[in-house]
């Protein structure tokens, strides 16, 4: 039996377990062979993977193969898995496991529907995680995001130094979606409840936290709906004068559009 050659940075991961973190957050833990060759630095700013979501209309999935130059060759569109981007919640190196948290929003989302139904033993395709890494420690952090960015914010908080200072703003639909997070003593955490998910409270809170100072020694990380992320990015750069290298604002989603039809920004 010929084993297909796969791209170097691609893995077929196996679901090890699933559990509900909150009513709207489902954790899927996957096993990856030799995680030490498939991870990111722990100080990475919210590492993310491009996940190939198994098709529900195919009993046997078809994954990318590699050509003679090592480049990815995908199956034809009618048999190709959908690609969605998800933040890594946790690397569990001792067990070669990765925790991926999915926001559940019914069958409207391909990845959400898969996460809700998947079971141990099923497969998912993953491209190697990647993320930005700061070259120096800022004097102050502002981390801001909605429910979709919560796994990334939690990852960042897990690996901040004990003396890190700043503010964390997280918008969720309600109290049931709040999670227990690791928080350095000099970091302040505020939960914002936005049942409609429009992001206005999050944007206003971020603008208030940033103020109008120069803030050259600050670092801003934001992940939210595109309009909210853009508003926070613009305030940090144009009003506060924070250098672009110190502002990392990501369009985690865009209202009315599916991934692949919009820019994730930065």
Image: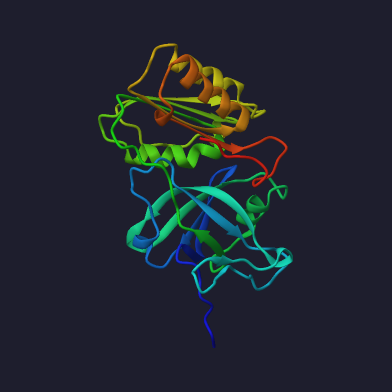
Observer-nearest residue: 172 or 45?
A: 45
Which residue does the image show at 37% across and 18% down from the upper left?
Answer: 215
Quadrant for residue 147, please give it.
Answer: top right
Left or right, residue 164 beside residue 19 = left
**Percent of width and height locating residue 122:** 57, 67
Query: Relative to the observer, which residue lies in front, 41 or 19?
Result: 41
Q: Is residue 84 left or right of residue 132?
A: right
Residue 21's spot in the image, x, y percent?
51, 45
- Frontmost residue, 262 versus 252: 262
Residue 187 visible in rendering = no
Vertical relation: 171 (above or below) 108: above
What residue occupies the far bottom of the structure in this picture? 1
Q: Quadrant of residue 160?
A: top left
Visible in this render: residue 146? yes
**Residue 254: horizontal and vertical position, in percent?**
65, 36
Q: Residue 97 vs residue 235: left or right?
A: left
Task: Name the residue furthest left.
Answer: 163
Residue 73 location, x and y as percent?
59, 67
> Which residue is found at the position 55% from the left and 65% from the top?
72
Determine whether 232 is above or below 56 in the image: above
């Amino acid at each position: 039996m010929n084993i297909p050659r796969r791209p170097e940075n691609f893995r077929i991961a196996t679901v090890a377990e699933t559990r509900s973190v909150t009513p709207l957050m489902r954790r899927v833990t996957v096993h990856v062979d030799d995680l030490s060759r498939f991870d990111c630095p722990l100080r990475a700013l919210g590492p993310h993977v491009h996940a190939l979501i198994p098709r529900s209309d195919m009993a046997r999935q078809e994954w990318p193969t590699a050509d003679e130059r090592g480049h990815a060759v995908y199956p034809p569109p009618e048999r190709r898995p959908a690609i969605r981007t998800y933040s890594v919640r946790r690397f569990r190196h001792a067990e070669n496991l990765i925790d991926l948290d999915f926001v559940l929003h019914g069958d409207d989302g391909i990845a959400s529907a898969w996460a809700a139904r998947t079971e141990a033993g099923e497969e998912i395709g993953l491209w190697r995680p990647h993320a930005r890494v700061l070259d120096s420690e800022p004097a102050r952090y502002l981390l801001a995001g909605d429910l979709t960015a919560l796994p990334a914010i939690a990852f960042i908080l897990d690996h901040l130094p004990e003396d890190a200072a700043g503010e964390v703003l997280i918008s969720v639909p309600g109290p049931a979606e709040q999670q227990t997070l690791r928080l350095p003593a000099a970091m302040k955490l505020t939960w914002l409840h936005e049942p409609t998910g429009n992001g206005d409270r999050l944007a206003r809170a971020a603008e208030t936290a940033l103020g109008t100072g120069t803030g050259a020694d600050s670092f801003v990380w934001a992940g939210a709906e595109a309009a909210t992320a853009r508003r926070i990015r613009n305030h940090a750069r144009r009003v506060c004068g924070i250098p672009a290298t110190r502002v990392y604002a990501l369009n985690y989603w865009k209202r009315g559009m599916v991934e692949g039809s919009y820019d994730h920004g930065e």
